[in-house]
Image (tube, coloured by chain):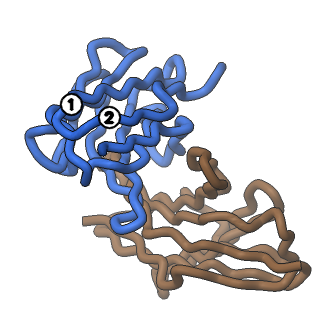
Chain colours: A brown, B blue
Amino acid sequence: AQSVAQPEDQVNVAEGNPLTVKCTYSVSGNPYLFWYVQYPNRGLQFLLKYITGDNLVKGSYGFEAEFNKSQTSFHLKKPSALVSDSALYFCAVRVLNNNDMRFGAGTRLTVKP
Amino acid sequence: DAGVIQSPRHEVTEMGQEVTLRCKPISGHNSLFWYRQTMMRGLELLIYFNNNVPIDDSGMPEDRFSAKMPNASFSTLKIQPSEPRDSAVYFCASSWDREGEKLFFGSGTQLSVL
């Protein structure tokens, strides 16, 4: 069965510093990997996805993620964090021929001024 | 397009009552998903439909939960009878049925069962 794991419940960074939110995946086929962000009392918003090709994927709001097949990871990164980036971040996986999407437990990112 | 529309936005009910949550997917999308979000269990997939047909309902907690999609523009999630442990935020999402397509989420229904 396909799944993703987010090993950190919480990540704290100072504004202006780089941030990383970790995600590892476990699938039996080629994965389609996604990052979503959730602000308080809102639905999930799409940030970026990896389908194939370049391992570095760029997305919304200056976020990017690196697909690493050997480490089965898809970490979310941003070179310089903003206080407004504080939110709940979810990694998700979808597999060829299996239409459902499975989410990780979420990581709460807090960016302090 | 207005996006995925869910109603009601908030629902407060008493234990034992029937609850119906509603979802209107984005026009043209042929896959629809129901998720439940709680602090303890995170985001759980309850059921998803392709072309109005339920494909996988293995995430539905028990027989008290049922979901229907009578047409391409409407779906319901019903809980009967409701229990306090059903209190959660329920999200509906839709997408095209193509490889690697992203999901578009509604704003959710905050359900409180007293």
Q: Quadrant of the C terminus of chain B?
A: top left
Front residue of B64/A30: it is B64
Q: Residue at x 37, y 46 (%)?
A: B35
- Judging from the image, what secondary structure is the residue with disc 2 in? strand
Chain under label 2? B
Q: Nearer the viewer, residue A15 or A33?
A: A15
> Neighbour class for label 1 at 10 Å: few (<14), some, many (≥20)?
few
- Specify the quadrant of the image occupied by residue A47: bottom right
Question: Which residue is label 1 attached to?
Answer: B17
Residue A71: x percent and y percent? Answer: 48, 87
Residue that extends furthest to the left in the rendered view of this protein: B63
Residue B46 shown left or right of residue A13 in the figure:
left
Q: Which mark is residue B13?
A: 2
Q: Residue B36, relative to residue A84: is it above or below?
A: above
Q: Amino acid at mark 1?
A: Gln
Q: Is the same chain shared between marks 2 and 1?
A: yes
Q: Residue at x 74, y 57 (%)?
A: A59
Residue at disc 1, secondary structure = loop
Q: Please, which chain is the residue tagged with disc 1 on? A: B
Look at 12% across and 38% down and name the residue there: B64
Measured from the top left, where is residue A14 in percent x and y? 83, 84
For image coordinates 21% across by 28% down, the residue present is B18
**Residue B49 sits in quarter:** top left
Q: Which mark is residue A55?
A: none
Mark 2 and 1 residues: CB-CB less than 8 Å, in contact?
A: yes
Query: Residue B78: image x %, image y %?
Result: 24, 29
